[in-house]
Amino acid sequence: MSTNAENALAVFQKAVGGEEGPTDWHEITQEQVNQFADATLDHQFIHVDPERAAQTPFGGPVAHGFLTLSLTAGLSMRMQSDPEAVKGMAMAVNYGLDKVRFINPVRVGRRVRLTRKLVSADLVAGGTAVQVKHEVTIHIEDEAKPACVAESLTRFVYS
C-alpha cells in the first residue's frame, strides 16, 4: 500500500515540465515598499525617498529585490494544487532557493504576477515528504523582461 507521500510524488512527477499561471496582477505600492524597508532595516533612498529616487535612472522608487522575491511565496499560494497532491498533507514549507536573479527593477506603482514551471519532485525525509523545485518568474506588466527568476524549493510533509 502506497503512502500519502508516495501518491503525491506520482502526481507531481507526472506534472514535471508543466507550467502554471499566471496569477492575478499585484500592484507594488509605496506603502508596501516602506513596510518591507521597516521589516528588513533596508531604508536605501531608491526604495523609500520618492524625490531622491526620481533623480536616478529608475525615475522613481523601486521595490527591493528581496521584496519581489518574497512575493513568490504568497503569489504561489494563489495557484490551485492538484487535490491528489495535497491529500494527507500535514504542511508545506519553504525549503530554499536556487539560482535567484533580479533581472529588471520593479518601479513603485507597477503590477507584477507569477508563473511557474515544475522542474522536479523527489521523495525526501525518509519517505514522509516530497520536495518540489519550481522555476518561478515574476513578470512586470507591459515589460518584456521579468523582474525575477528563481528556482524555489518547497517541501510537502505528509501524515
Image (cartoon, rainbow, N blue to C red):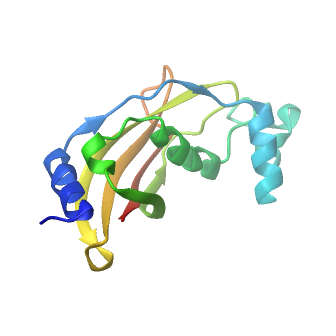
Front one among 149 and 156? 156
Image quadrant in which the N terminus is located? bottom left
Q: Quadrant of residue 84?
A: top left
In the displayed structure, does residue 79 sit left or right of residue 109?
A: left
| Residue 30 visible within the image | yes
Q: Provide residue 28's location: percent of width, then percent of height.
A: 66, 31
Instruction: Judge from the rendering whether residue 86 lies leftward or rightward of residue 95; answer left or right.
Output: left
- Which sits in the foreground, 20 or 144? 20
Q: Is residue 95 above or below residue 32?
A: below
The image position of residue 45, as x and y in percent, is 83, 46
Question: Residue 147: percent from the left, percent from the top?
Answer: 51, 39
Q: Is residue 55 left or right of residue 26?
A: right
Residue at (48%, 60%) from the top-left corner? 94
Residue plotted at (23% across, 66% down): 122
| Residue 111 found in image quarter | top right
Task: Assign the C terminus to one quadrant of the image.
Answer: bottom left
Q: Residue furthest top?
A: 142
- Left or right of residue 15, residue 90 in this image: right
Q: At which x and y percent is residue 105?
A: 59, 39
Please state which of residues 4 and 72 is positioned toward the viewer in this rendering: 4
Taking the view exactly as shown, the residue that stands out farthest to the bottom is 126
Q: Is residue 153 visible?
A: no
55 vs 5: above or below: above
Q: Is residue 25 above or below residue 40?
A: above
